[in-house]
Image (cartoon, rainbow, N blue to C red):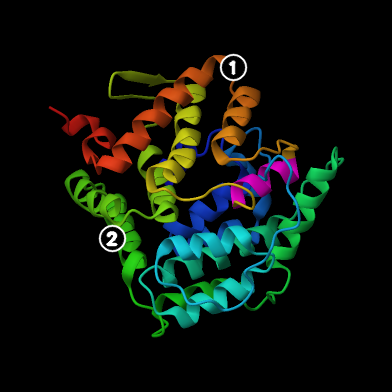
Amino acid sequence: MKKYLKSAFLGVIVITAVIFLLHFSQDAEIQAVVNNPEASTKLDEKALEAALTAQALQPLAAKEHAASLSRSQDAADMLRGSRDYRVVHEALTQAGTTEARFYAKDILRRCLAMRKLGFQPIAVVSAQQEFARELLQARCSSFSDEELSLDALRQVDSDPRYPRGLFELSQEWTEAADAGNETRQKDVFSRILQADDALLLQHVGLSLLGQYRDAVSLGDVEFIGNAALNSMRWAWIAAVCEGTGTDCGVGDAYLVEICANMDICESSRIRALRALVARDEGEKQLAKFDAAHAMFVKAIQSRDVRLFFPQHTQ
């Protein structure tokens, strides 16, 4: 798995890299990053810790009650509208739904990364950025240090209150990727596409696309070099929203993080990530971003696994 990380996160922000590592690496690798968060900046020379919000991010009407959750979309909506992720985490613990374990663990991973990495020492430029920074801190502030620990993450794996669901699919992917078994990866990724969950697709897709380290042809578009590959991966993070019909607007974690740390404050994930690509990779790469985004949305909606494994395409 280590061999995929460098290429997977050239151009990807530090918090995202750490969350990815917490999703797909072994305990020794996790411990190394948690104990030495500065080392994670080696994954990205530009290493900004990351973030996002909407163009006119107003205080959100919080769904802070333990609402019943019946599908992944409900969990995604609660996260987007929340000012306290602990409340969402507790609701997931009680929900007993197929996505609950995966989403609950993702909350702990994200907040652990935030707690360890903190904020970049930057001058706040706008009121939107200031609000985004406050929201970013508030979302994880009610968790104790013990709750945001490696032991707490491991306990979620075996907690009997959660069905296996999406979590089991993510584990199957990790095993297939670690083994380098492309046939198995294709089978698991096909089932992940069928599950149609934006958060699961986001993390697994980054793992898959990170395997293409120098160049790859997807459809009739070539992505050669770091700038093009970075733009392609950002396009994937945006495409999971449209592809699954998930609302990634105001309050979306990527929007809040990008706005908080970069003052790129947009109303949707795709607008924020296009702006990020233009800034960090150059406006010439927007064509690659747009082409990848269109292909990814279509493939997610049609459940077409072939696009993602070009070596298997006839």
Percent across and percent down for residue 288 are 45, 21
| Direction from residue 269 to residue 311 in the image, left or right | left
| Callout 1 amino acid | Glu
The residue range painted magenta reads 253-261
Give whichever of 232, 240 is nearer the camera.
240
Q: Which residue position is annotated with label 1? A: 283
Majority secondary structure in the magenta region: helix
- Determine whether 156 is above or below 314 in the image: below
| Direction from residue 294 to residue 314 in the image, left or right | left
Give whichever of 249, 259 is nearer the camera.
249
Q: Which residue position is annotated with label 2? A: 172
Q: Residue at x 42, y 52 (%)?
A: 198
- Determine whether 221 is above or below 60 in the image: above
Q: Nearer the viewer, mark 1 or mark 2?
A: 1
Q: Residue at x 67, y 43 (%)?
A: 54
- Determine whether 294 is above or below 116 in the image: above
Task: Say the numbered circle drawn on residue 80.
Answer: none
Is residue 154 visible from the viewing direction of this image? yes
In three-dimensional space, the C-alpha distance between marks 1 and 2, rounded to whole angstroms, equals 38 Å
Is residue 50 visible from the viewing direction of this image? no
Determine if the magenta segment contains residue 120: no
